[in-house]
Image: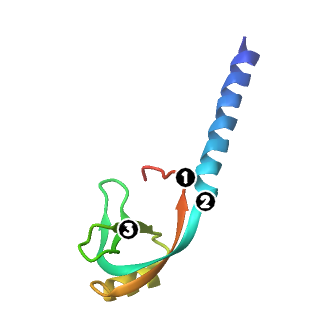
Amino acid sequence: MKKALFLVLGGIAVLFAIIYAFIYFVTFSDGIRSGELIKISHKGVLVKTWEGEISQGISGAQIFSFSILDKDQEIIEKLQEYQGEYVKVEYVERYATFFW
């Protein structure tokens, strides 16, 4: 009985690790987007993340939202400086994201 429980829990742990690795490491697409940088903010209740938005259309109907890693402080400072101006952002899009 203990062996079966151990195998089931081990299998669940391995499955969780595979799903986590897939979500974290596998990319859906990458490229460069350009437009007017309309927002850069540090938001979140429990976990704070840097978020930005680029307007890609004249009316602002096409908004590209993106996140910036906390370790990229130089990029964050440059984006804060260029808010309201035309910028190009290199991005990596993943299949899914974690809530944090």
Identity of the amino acid at label 1? Tyr
Query: Which residue is under mark 3?
Result: 64
Disc 3 to disc 2, how far (Cα)? Answer: 17 Å
Name which of mark 2 and mark 1 comes first in the sequence: 2
From the top left corner, tell me how far across and down residue 54 is, in percent. 34, 74
Q: What kind of colouring is applied to the model shown?
A: rainbow
Give the side of residue 5 with respect to residue 57, left or right.
Answer: right
The residue positioned farthest toward the front in the image shown: 58
- Taking the spot 41% from the left edge, 67% from the top edge, the residue there is 66
Give the side of residue 86 with respect to residue 6, left or right.
Answer: left
Quadrant for residue 44, please give it: bottom left
Identity of the amino acid at label 2? Thr
Identity of the amino acid at label 3? Phe
Question: Which label number is shown at residue 95?
Answer: 1
Q: Secondary structure at mark 3?
A: strand
Of residue 41 and residue 48, the one placed in the foreground of this image is 41
Quadrant for residue 8, please give it: top right
- Taking the spot 69% from the left edge, 18% from the top edge, the residue there is 5
Seen in the picture, residue 73 relative to 13 is either above or below; the reply is below
Disc 1 to disc 3, how far (Cα)? Answer: 16 Å
